[in-house]
């Protein structure tokens, strides 16, 4: 079979590019080695990970940076396309394309990102907040102690999901 274009990588960007191009009528091949990063990704969409204003962060990048070459208008339309595609399949993304936000990571640190899956909509918390963690028995990939060390009012419940990995769950 002859292809019009080959996408290198089956991560979120490669998959979205292939969907977009296939919708435009092109024959697309995805070339990938190993598991796609999507299987271990947080699902967050980082645009420009410094400061709250993504547009200002993009303006501050060197002119050789891909974001400068593409331009803010095309970045915005691409991200809106992504949000629309995900929404069509019931996977809403929350956040704003023009504003970064801070979310809590599984190790209790804050991370700058722009768009998050709807399941992470409330992942932005203040240091003073108390919350409850539901963890999984014997899971190798998550350590609630990291969070309870940073947030002393945090409580933990353990659930036995019958698996020892996040992929198994």
Image: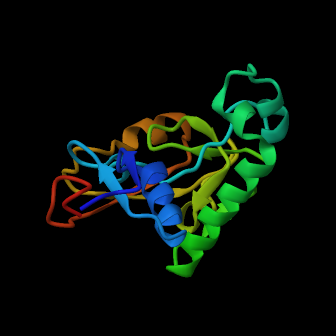
Quadrant in which residue 77 is drawn = bottom right
The answer to whether 60 appears left or right of 114 in the picture is: right
Most foreground residue, 77 or 120: 77
Q: Answer yes or no: is residue 119 visible.
A: yes
Q: Where is residue 82 in the image (x, y as percent from the top left)?
A: 60, 63
Q: Answer yes or no: is residue 98 visible.
A: no
Q: Where is residue 5 in the image (x, y as percent from the top left)?
A: 41, 52
Q: In which quarter of the image is the N terminus?
A: bottom left
The answer to whether 13 appears left or right of 129 in the picture is: left
Q: Where is residue 123 in the image (x, y as percent from the top left)?
A: 60, 54
The answer to whether 83 appears left or right of 4 in the picture is: right
Instruction: Kindly identify the residue that appears in the image at 71 percent across and 33 percent down.
Output: 69
Quadrant in which residue 88 is drawn = bottom right
Instruction: Kindly identify the residue that appears in the image at 26 percent across and 55 percent down.
Output: 166
101 in relation to 159, above or below: above
Number of numbered callouts drawn: 0
Q: Position of residue 151 (x, y in %)?
A: 56, 41
Instruction: Kindly identify the residue that appears in the image at 60 percent across and 37 percent down.
Output: 110
């Amino acid at each position: 079979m002859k292809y019009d274009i080959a996408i290198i990588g089956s991560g979120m960007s490669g998959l979205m590019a292939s969907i977009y191009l296939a919708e435009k009528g092109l024959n697309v091949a995805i070339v990938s080695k190993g598991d796609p990063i999507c299987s271990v990704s947080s699902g967050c969409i980082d645009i420009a990970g410094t400061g709250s204003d993504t547009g200002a962060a993009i303006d501050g990048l060197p002119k050789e940076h891909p974001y400068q070459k593409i331009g803010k208008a095309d970045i915005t339309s691409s991200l809106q396309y992504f949000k629309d595609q995900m929404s069509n399949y019931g996977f809403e993304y929350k956040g704003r394309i023009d504003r970064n936000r801070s979310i809590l990571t599984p190790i209790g640190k804050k991370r700058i990102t722009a768009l998050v899956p709807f399941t992470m909509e409330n992942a932005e918390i203040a240091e003073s907040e108390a919350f409850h963690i539901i963890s999984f028995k014997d899971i190798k990939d998550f350590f609630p102690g990291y969070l309870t060390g940073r947030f002393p009012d945090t409580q933990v419940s353990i659930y036995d999901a019958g698996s020892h990995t996040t992929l198994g769950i």
